[in-house]
Image (tube, grey):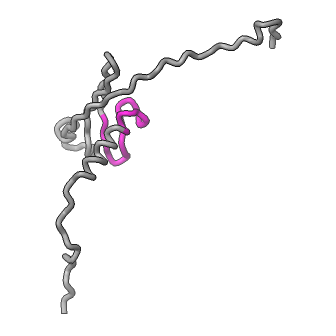
Amino acid sequence: MKQLKGRAGARKKRKVQIPQVPSTYDAEPLDPWLQCGPDTTVTELWKVWERREKETTLHLVYFDRYGWYCEHGRSCKAVAEVRRIVRTMSANAPRPRSSGKTRARKRK
């Protein structure tokens, strides 16, 4: 390895950090049977628009027997956003009006 003399070896390059603008997401549920066909294993399909200032990215997020995925990969931020939307939708859904006493009776 070549040894640097003087101040040349002491210099370090700095990485300039650009402030990230937070993304806004708009999601629209789609019918997987119509979009993917009748033989699909996809049960949830969402079209997600990710907007940052003037840049817009389209994502297709889907849920099948293997889990949640985006066309950009499993670790895409749109997947987390859709999972959050689905979680809040299921939390706000009305609960069934059951007293819990609807078990079958024993026969004599």
Q: How many marks?
A: 0
| Rendered position, 92 above or below 55 | below
Q: Position of residue 62 (x, y in %)?
A: 30, 39
Which quadrant holds residue 72? top left
Q: Nearer the viewer, residue 5 or 65?
A: 5
* Quadrant of image for the N terminus: top right
The residue at the point 39 percent across, 33 percent down is: 77
| Rendered position, 7 above or below 69 | above
Which quadrant holds residue 51? top left
Q: Is residue 83 left or right of residue 96?
A: right
Q: Position of residue 107 (x, y in %)?
A: 19, 89
Asked whether 76 falls inside the magenta stretch, the response is yes
Q: Which residues are magenta?
A: 61-80
| Rendered position, 97 above or below 46 | below
* Quadrant of image for the C terminus: bottom left
The residue at the point 21 percent across, 60 percent down is: 95
Asked whether 22 falls inside the magenta stretch, the response is no
Q: Position of residue 73 (x, y in %)?
A: 41, 33
Q: Nearer the viewer, residue 29 or 65?
A: 29
Q: Position of residue 43 (x, y in %)?
A: 26, 46
